[in-house]
Image (cartoon, helix red, strand yellow):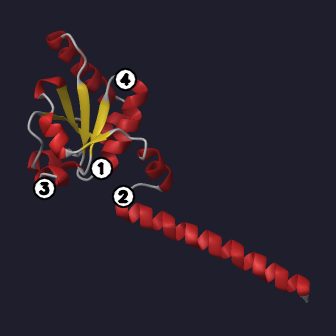
Amino acid sequence: MINKRKLLIVGLTIFLSIASSCGIAGAVYLKTGLSVPYYLRSLKTERLTVPELKQLPQDDLLIIDVRTPDEYAAEYIPNSILIPIQDIEAGFGLKKIETEIIKFQANKNQSPKIILYCQTGPRSIRAFETLQTEFDIEILVLTGGMRAWNAGI
């Protein structure tokens, strides 16, 4: 009798632990659009706010919009270029970025500071992870993305 009771308690504990973990994972995804592993890695992402971006010398920046062409056509941050996250993750977007960096370096004799943005943040965080392994230059994610830009925050 005691063994069945202990087994039931252990089983319920395991079940409740798994159920609560799923609830946390779901909440993280709904709030951020990121899976739990991506969210945890995103905490290490270098970021800046819209006011901080506006204070930087624009000539020192390479601002990359990682949204879709349709989103970019609807609205974008001035002087940004479109390189969708799908292109970056497929590899050929990295070639475009490398070309832009080389052009920038040829004109300015320095490397640009790369600013990444999407609509709210998840895609730019994915791009950040890819780019930081490929390029040895400063890369930042715009906190809140296009929504924050439109709100001015």
Rate crowding at label 2 as few (under 14), some (14 to 19) or many (20 or more) other CA atoms within 10 Å: some
Q: Residues within 10 Å of mark 1 (few under 14, many from 20)?
A: many
Q: Which residue appears at 40% of the width and 34% of the height?
A: 130
Q: Earlier in the sequence, mark 3 or mark 2?
A: 2
> Which of the numbered marks, if any, corresponds to residue 121?
1
Q: Is the C-beta separation of discs 3 and 2 under 8 Å?
A: no
Earlier in the chain: of badge 2 and badge 4, it is 2
Q: Amino acid at mark 1?
A: Gly
Cα gap from disc 1 to disc 3, whole angstroms = 15 Å
Residue 101: x and y, percent? 24, 20
Would you say the residues marked 4 and 1 are in contact, meaning their CB atoms lie under 8 Å apart?
Answer: no
Residue where numbered disc 4 is placed: 135
* Residue assigned mark 3: 151
The quarter in which the N terminus is drawn is bottom right
**Residue type at mark 2?**
Thr
**Mark 3, secondary structure of its residue:** helix
Residue type for callout 3? Ala
Instruction: Depth check: give the residue in front, 144 or 82.
Output: 144
In the rendered structure, find residue 9 and report the number of the disc placed on it. none
Q: Pick the residue in front: 12 or 51.
A: 51
